[in-house]
Image: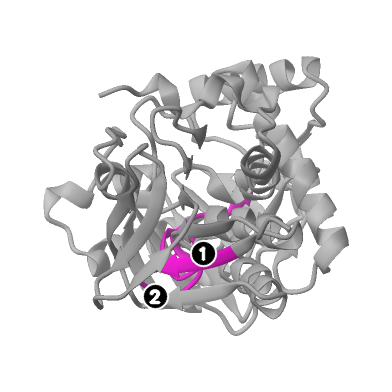
Amino acid sequence: MKRPERVAVIGVGILGACVGWNLSRQGAEVVFIDAGEPGEGVTNWSFSWVNASNKTARKSYFDLNVAGMAAHRELAGTIGPDSWWYPSGHLRWADDAAVQAKLLETAGLLTSWDYRVEVCTGDEVRRRLEPDLRMPGEVPVVFYPDEAWVHGRYLVGRLVGQAVASGAELRSGTAVCDIGTGGDGSIRTVAFSDGSRLDVDIVVNAAGPSASHVAGLLARHLPMRREPGVVTRIGCAEVPVRRAMHAPHVEMRPDGDGLVVLHSREIDALIDTGKGPAQLARLLHESARQVVPELGDSRIAQTRVAHRPIPADGFPSVGAVPSLPGYYEAVSHSGITLGPVIGRLLASEILRGTRDKLLADFRPERFTS
């Protein structure tokens, strides 16, 4: 009887956790490997918004993200939704006429693609959804009722915990420093910074911002963007927001445990100007108070500048690299939305050779040395 494939999943954020969980439950021998702790990297420092409304640049990318949303709902039914899954919808509005027009144009496009959209006024939003918002009563607000937010660290912990309970191994706090191949070029070993070595059949590169470095261990060129983002958590005695939202100049959502997450592309643009994380956090906090005055009494709890794992063309790199037998990539921005669907599709590809058409535009072979 052939032994199960031994798969080293390098990087235990949302993508690595989803791939490893799917492999483990289908009988593969999985080893999770992370230089830190599961879910504590970029996964814990993203806006964690499950959506396809912001993914309209390419219809195939939109379709993949819609499948990601459906896979989240299925996953919540499989493992239980408590502590990580919050399908409360998403609000978006603007204070600039041109931006408002673009939002409504996008809403029309999404409606034509059978994506659920509701357009309401600020007054309706305050009455029905978010009573503590400060916004003009007549401003158009787009509401996406099927969108959600996810507590990424809790989800990773749940998936890895289930996989380990079923026989998977977790090696955290140790980095991969070499990937060994045989005479035919296929994967044979993974070597660690502590001097140990592991025999494996397959490597999944889910290393997020470090994915280019991991690929380089096999002389594989994976070009990545440099795109840092700052995320702040503020603590509140009572959280005054109920769902994810993109307000003018700031986005926010609840985070459980009396916390609210703040992010802004405008503040991200200041990262390279010399402003430190504390200054950036104060700017985020001030922007949030303009939208939700009750956040004025909140305190800044945590701030981090994290690097988003975005391949050079902005789209995911998922699947086998034909020139490197046994090597697969799972590298993408929007990992929170895409994690469950990429996990399922890549596990099927690894174990059965199935190449799903949803990933046709996102194969790794589009990047060559």
**CA distance separating discs 2 and 1:** 9 Å
Q: Quadrant of the N terminus?
A: bottom right
View extreme (right): residue: 77
- Percent across and percent down for residue 85 are 74, 62
Q: Label 1 crowding class (10 Å Cα cut-off): few <14, some 14-19, many 20+?
A: many
Q: Which residue is mark 1?
A: 261
The quarter of the picture where residue 292 lies is bottom right
Q: Nearer the viewer, residue 115 or 248?
A: 115
Q: Residue 363: within the magenta?
A: no
What residue appears at the point 44 percent right and 44 percent down from the top-left corner?
A: 249
* Residue 220 shown left or right of residue 51 in the figure: left
Magenta part of the protein: which range? Answer: 30-49
View extreme (left): residue: 274
View extreme (front): residue: 1
Q: Amino acid at mark 1?
A: Val
Q: Earlier in the sequence, mark 2 or mark 1?
A: 1
The quarter of the picture where residue 121 lies is top right
Residue 17 shows in this picture: yes
Q: Residue 41: within the magenta?
A: yes
Q: Label 2 crowding class (10 Å Cα cut-off): few <14, some 14-19, many 20+?
A: some
- Percent across and percent down for residue 247 are 55, 45
Q: Which residue is mark 2?
A: 302
What residue appears at the point 82 percent right and 31 percent down from the top-left corner?
A: 116
Element class at badge 2: strand
Residue 4 marker: none
Q: Amino acid at mark 2?
A: Gln
* Residue 88 shown left or right of residue 164 in the figure: right
Q: Nearer the viewer, residue 164 or 277?
A: 164
Q: Where 234 falls versus 272 (above or below)?
A: below
What residue appears at the point 39 percent right and 28 percent down from the top-left corner?
A: 323
Residue 332 shows in this picture: no
